[in-house]
Amino acid sequence: MARNPKRPAGARSARTSLGDHFTAWRHHHRDSLADALGRMRGTPGSTLLTILVIAIALALPTGLSVLLDNARVITQGWDGRAHLSVFLKMDVNEERQRALAKDWAALDGVADTEVITRQQALDEFREQSGFGDVLEALPDNPLPPLIVVFPSNNEPAALEALQQRLSKLPEVDLAQLDVAWVRRLHAIIELGQRLIGVLTLALAAAVVLVVVNTVRLAIESRREEIVVIKIVGGTDGFVRRPFLYSGFCCGFAGGLGALILVGTALWWLGGPVNQLLDLYKSEHSLTGMSPATALILPLFSGALGLLGAWLAVSRHLGEIEPQF
Amino acid sequence: MIKFDRVSKRYASGKDALRRVSFELPAGQLTFLTGHSGAGKSTLLKLIMMIERPTQGQIFVGRQNLNGFGNRHIPLLRRKIGMVHQNHQLLFDRSVFDNVALPLVIAGFPKADIGKRVRAALDKVGLLSKEKQNPIMLSGGEQQRVGIARAVVNKPPLLLADEPTGNLDPALSAEIMDLFHDFARVGVAVLIATHDLSLIARYRHRLLTLREGNLIHDGVESATPAAGDWYGA
């Protein structure tokens, strides 16, 4: 219709400016946070219970993944020492042995080779086994020439391929590789990772549901207030905000609680685990959570709380309408 | 201030709560709305507050057609309407001051402004000395006046009252009516839903009567005796 485009009907009747609105919005956020914290303090029992449930639910996957990370670091060290022991036929002389070692070192997938001559093997065996006298009694040196091959690639499949390739050479008697344990270890770590993934998903869902329930009860107990706010013109956002803040706060506090639980458990386990590692002559020691984890966990948990509060609010707030 | 143009409301249950109701409330007029329970009073108030939407017809508040309003406009509409309830709808977890301040906080008034306006509203209803008390400590009449202070604190152009004197004795009812007259005099359109016939009889105001969803009477009750000149001029 032909209306005067300058007519600011809505704006003129409003008695608050845009700047006022922004200030009020900012204040409302601050007040909502204060309100959420105040109400959490007002019901310390149920708040603490909610936070504790969240903390335990999140501590479980966090703690397990810290342990798994440790296991991975330690086994990486073991992987690094994987090698093939290639025993040559007895009639291969030392000159030929050294030539072969040199050739193989240039092969694809080989990082380095080490020659152990029959004499060296004998000396070493005599020294380490204490069976020197027995060896003296033998007419010949019974030990075959040996080339130790250090692969450049520690993948079980690559190691096996290398082993097969070397076995087929005419000078080679036996190429020995025990990859079974490496495979098992990899499989176990993989499985552990998957399990932690599933556990994390399930427990994250549990955290969301706990917050949904807490916020639902909070909404129920504040029904009258919500009705009044709606009657006097409060927007859905105004009604929603304190609940979202309380959801986030519960989640955040639960995340901090999980950090404390995991930290305590690691501290408690640290002594015995390091002792055990020492017994295995490992230079590793139990490492705790990374600073990134410590930062992300409460935020992640807070986000879960926010999600839970959002679900509860969007489901239950619409049901509360003024009646008369 | 309000205009109903052939408004009908049929609930999902099939009940016709309002049938082609038309009327207009000018600014500065005090109007009674009456009828038996179930006649459509509550529905009419709900339509103005946009708690319900009409099945047919158009409702104007100010110059705006409510049919064109989406859900997100509802809060802004309600800020232009002061609503007084029979059961006061006060919050007992905060002081009288905070109860009255709520509409201003929601509308985003600056803090200093809120203090001034709340005290002005409480002064108007004679409860300035009780601002720090919890409303649960107040008498029924005082609680109703707190409810009125909250309804008018942001100076809405329209005041709706649902059985505002329902639980009050005649003397207190008269006090409440005095307040409504004062608001009408400064240009507020006041609509009072009541089935308190003695109240209606005492004041010579325009009366809308609903029966089974039809508006069967619209006008000043000429037969009403003037029991005191409560509304002054």
Image (spheres, helix red, strand yellow):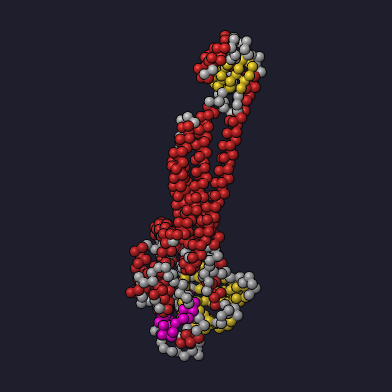
Q: Is residue A43 above or below residue A96?
A: below
| Residue found at x 59% / y 76% | B18
Q: Is A103 within the magenta? A: no
Question: Residue A194: x percent and y percent?
Answer: 58, 41
| Residue found at x 45% / y 52% | A253
Q: Nearer the viewer, residue A236 or B88?
A: B88
- The quarter holding residue A191 reads top right
Asked if residue B103 lies left or right of residue B54, the reply is: left
Q: Is residue A58 above or below residue B61?
A: above
* Res A68 seen here: yes
Question: Residue B17: x percent and y percent?
Answer: 60, 76
| Residue found at x 56% / y 40% | A193
- The quarter holding residue B42 reads bottom right
Question: Residue B117: x percent and y percent?
Answer: 36, 69
Asked if residue A69 lies left or right of residue A173, the reply is: left
Q: Nearer the viewer, residue B77 or A201?
A: A201
**In which quadrant of the rendered image does the N terminus of chain A lie?**
bottom right
Q: Nearer the viewer, residue A188 or B20?
A: A188
Q: Nearer the viewer, residue A302 or A96?
A: A96
* Res A101 seen here: no
Question: Residue B68: x percent and y percent?
Answer: 55, 65
* Numbered disc total: 0
Q: Is B179 within the magenta? A: yes
| Residue found at x 53% / y 67% | A321
- Residue extending farthest left: B129
- Range shown magenta: B156-181
